[in-house]
Image (cartoon, helix red, strand yellow):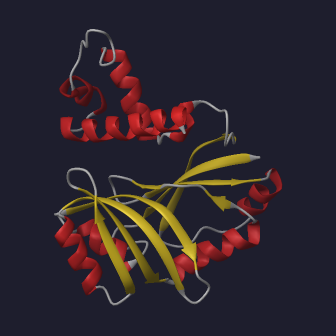
């Protein structure tokens, strides 16, 4: 069984879905990941999404979106929130769902939202399923780049396999500059200089990394 991690980026002026585009363009809300998406077979999907930022503004966007049939938002730690919604599909969503069904590929979770509005998606399947997928044309208006591929190890693999590529980059930088030394020899600011982002973003990434790794150890 193999996996392929893709980064899918919409062309300028387009988006994956109207609701996601509204959230991505709002300066007060940052989409982080889609942790679950289930096809209900009636032109809607249920979504479990993670965002950071203004939770009340996130609720307003969902409430004002005619594509959203129902939703609820739960506050998390700090400015983090989790949103459940039942949302109408669009042509791209239906295309991706139908392609997954035809090719017998499984979409792993979470789907990470990249800084430029793209999505980092990991698909799991057999060699034959990926060979069939390679013969299909990509949808117009979207750039699809293969980021990595290899054998899929759902259990017993390296703990870092559960991390996104950006999280691994931050973790590697933190180790390199001595963030995890005893006593600690570096700060979030030091890590941020290496990976070219803000110290606050480094802190968020390290929290996710530690939660994922330690959760796997004791899970």
As drawn, the residue found furthest toward the top would be: 183
Instruction: Name the residue at the front extreme.
Output: 218
Up-down: is 32 above or below 96? above
Say whether residue 57 is left or right of residue 173: left
Please tell me which residue lies in front, 139 or 188: 188
Is residue 13 visible in the rendered image? The answer is: no
Question: Is 181 rendered above or below residue 134?
Answer: above
Foreground residue among 12 and 209: 209
Q: Residue 52: image x %, image y %?
A: 25, 57
Residue beneath the point at 80% across and 51% down: 127
In the figure, residue 41 lies in which quadrant?
Answer: bottom right
Left or right, 72 with respect to 59, comes to right
How many marks the image carries: the answer is 0
Residue 93 visible in image: yes
Q: Quadrant of the C terminus?
A: top right
Q: Is residue 162 left or right of residue 77?
A: right
Residue 102 horizontal/vertical position (percent): 75, 72
* Image point (40%, 64%), residue name: 49
Instruction: Tell me what residue is drawn at x 78 percent, y 59 percent.
Output: 129
Say which quarter of the image contains residue 98.
bottom right
Residue 107 drawn at (x, y percent): 61, 60
Give the vertical position of 169 relative to 68 (above or below): above
Q: Position of residue 177 (x, y in %)?
A: 30, 16
Residue found farthest to the right: 128
Which residue is depicted at the point 30% across and 70% down? 73
């Amino acid at each position: 069984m193999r996996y392929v991690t893709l980064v899918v980026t919409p062309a300028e002026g387009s988006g994956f879905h109207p609701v996601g585009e509204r959230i991505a363009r709002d300066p007060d809300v940052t989409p982080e990941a889609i942790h679950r998406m289930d096809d209900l077979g009636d032109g809607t999907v249920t979504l479990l999404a993670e965002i950071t930022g203004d939770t009340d503004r996130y609720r307003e966007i969902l409430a004002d979106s005619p594509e959203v049939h129902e939703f609820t938002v739960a506050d998390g730690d700090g400015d983090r929130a989790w949103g459940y919604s039942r949302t109408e599909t669009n042509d791209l969503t239906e295309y991706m769902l139908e392609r997954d069904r035809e090719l017998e590929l499984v979409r792993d979770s979470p789907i990470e939202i990249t800084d430029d509005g793209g999505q980092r998606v990991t698909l799991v399947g057999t060699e034959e399923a990926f060979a069939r997928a390679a013969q299909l044309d990509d949808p117009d208006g979207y750039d699809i780049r293969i980021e990595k591929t290899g054998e899929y190890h759902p259990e017993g693999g390296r703990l870092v396999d559960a991390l996104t590529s950006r999280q691994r980059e931050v973790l590697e930088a933190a180790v390199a500059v001595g963030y995890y030394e005893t006593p600690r020899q570096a700060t979030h600011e030091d890590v941020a200089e290496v990976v070219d982002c803000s110290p606050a973003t480094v802190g968020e990434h390290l929290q996710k990394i530690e939660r994922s790794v330690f959760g796997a150890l004791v899970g």
